[in-house]
Amino acid sequence: MGRLSVNLSGLVLDNPIIPASGTFGFGYEFAEYYDINILGSISLKGTTKDPRYGNPLPRIAECSSGMLNAVGLQNPGVDKVISEELPKLRKCFSKKAVANVSGFSLEDYVYTCEKMDKQEEVGILEVNISCPNVKHGGMSFGTSAESAAEITRAVKSVTKKPVYMKLSPNVTDIVSIAKACEEAGADGIAMINTLLGMRINLRDKKPILFNKSGGFSGSAIFPVAVSMVYRVYEAINIPIIGMGGVTTAEDVIEMMLAGATAVEVGAANLIEPYACKNIIEGLPAAMDKYKIDSLESIIGGAH
Amino acid sequence: MKQSIFKIVSNKKLADITYEMVLQGDCTDITRPGQFVNIKLDGFFLRRPISVCNSKDDILTIIYKVVGKGTEVMANMTEGEELDILTGLGNGYELSKSGDKPLLIGGGAGVPPMYMLAIELIKKGVTPTVVLGFNKKSEVFYEEEFKALGIKTIVATADGSYGIKGFVTDAIKGLDYTYFYTCGPEMMLKALYDNTTTSGQLSFEARMGCGFGACMGCTCETLYGNKRICKDGPVLEKEEVKWAD
């Protein structure tokens, strides 16, 4: 293992950097810009049982040091993801991907996870029980410990690959939800999804987003994410994929010190198409600067 | 798509709240009129997507309206300052369908892409007619630049303070054309869709996240399936456009 590599539930990543779901499509489009095989892995666009157009426009609004999105899980549906998107990814990416799955009922999650679990390109399942941009399902499963555990159990019963539950920060106590997922058999936790936010247009005096509110991401939410990862790390014994506003190599180190084993980079990809590449290339120098020999050795190091 | 640093050569006011910025840098990824660039500004999270007015050798010309804080910062920039720009974004106009008498219709901030389109059509031996629509006389720009290309240039203002009184749909009445290309506010695009007699291409605007197809922030429905305005557009063929109810 190299000094950047980490072990995520048995899946050894060359480095901890994973583009976050929804900011990197199905990966292959970024292959036009750089060799995506330098990435640790890729979290694929959130996939649902049926195809979804998502929310009407506008879906995007700007904030100080961040943005709101209310895309609403646009995706071609699991069958087309398997028949069209994964083969395209396979042509330019030789590593295992993270399959991000969403649903609107327990049965949806089970159906989609069972199918994605069987795909050779998939190394880990990331079960999104935290999407703030859909009316039913999504976040509603991730806001109580009971329903989070129920989804975890159901998905675990039909899958063989590691299952990471992606949690919402829009809850009273994220620690109890993470613990409930662990007790229900989750192999890891992915956190945090976006924070609920809204912007209002002063000209027409109405919310900018058609969906009214959306998910707040970007560097502004980084300290929120670090704090939540730190607290959850103390309460559970399964690995955490940390995310939320990560923009630089230094942010990656900070997130790992808080307790993350791997780190997803989201909104930064949308501003800097080369964000993940820049972070990976910047990690060795940042590690030297802070006298870090290997990334694996600093996980949870702030505790 | 290419990310590179451009240096401002000039930045001047053309008309009411309308500025022209000339930049020097690597324009090799700008391959078609109708494409856009995405500009990073200090202090702002998202980039600003602006259509290409012209690109020749290493000189990029953009025209933008000051509509918010980001474009306000741009208006105050001066010669020699540098900008981080993504170039070569969007599909751009398909020139081969123009026929021999295409009509180019630009409305307000939709006027700039018509300029490079006119230049490229002329290079192919096609002589377009251009119709420019503005709200009022003080907002009119680039009339002389289009005329200098040696093409028929018609200006319309909604309040009648300059040129033909009315909208571009009034200005195109009676014109003989083989095809149309347009860019402008969505209401204008819809009016042209309903009032043009030929096929054509329409360029759409949207609030974008990334500008290069990654975030699905600007997806629209078309008769040919979902399309990302930033990557599969911004230019759509008239035949595929599906209007929101």
Image (cartoon, coloured by chain):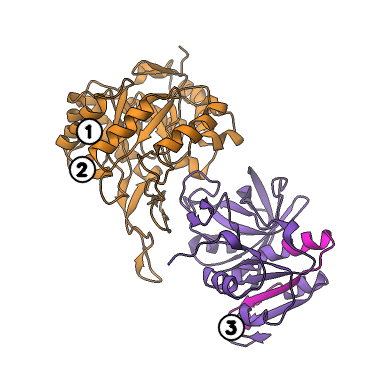
The purple-coloured chain is labelled B
In the image, residue A182 above or below residue B216: above
Q: Residue at x 36, y 25 (%)?
A: A117
Q: Which of marks 3 and 2 is in front?
A: 3
User: Does residue B242 appear left or right of residue A238 in this picture?
Assistant: right
Residue B49 visible to the viewer? yes
- Circle 3 sits on which residue? B158
Residue sitting at the far top: A1
| Few, some or many residues within 10 Å of mark 1 (<14, 14–19, 20+) | many
Residue A186 on image: x %, y %: 25, 25
Q: Colour of chain A?
A: orange
Q: In which quarter of the view is residue A142 placed?
A: top left
In the foreground, A132 or A14: A132
Magenta residues?
A: B117-142
Q: Please, which chain is the residue tagged with disc 3 on?
A: B
User: Is residue A150 found left or right of B72 in the rendered image?
Assistant: left
In the drawing, does residue B78 fall left or right of residue B225? right
In the picture of the structure, the residue carrying the numbered disc 1 is A151
Quick one: label 3, few (<14), some, or many (20+) residues within 10 Å?
A: some
| Nearest the eye: A132 or B9 | A132
Q: In the rendered structure, which disc, 1 or 2, sits on the residue that comes first in sequence?
A: 1
Viewer can see residue A33:
no
Q: Which of marks 1 and 2 is in front?
A: 1
Element type at marker 2?
loop
Q: Label 3 sits on what residue type?
A: Ala
Query: Residue A281's x, y, as percent?
Result: 54, 27
Q: Is residue B2 magenta?
A: no
Q: In whole angstroms, how far apart are the C-alphas of marks 3 and 2?
A: 52 Å
Q: Which residue in the structure is indicated by mark 2?
A: A171
Front tag of 1 and 3: 1
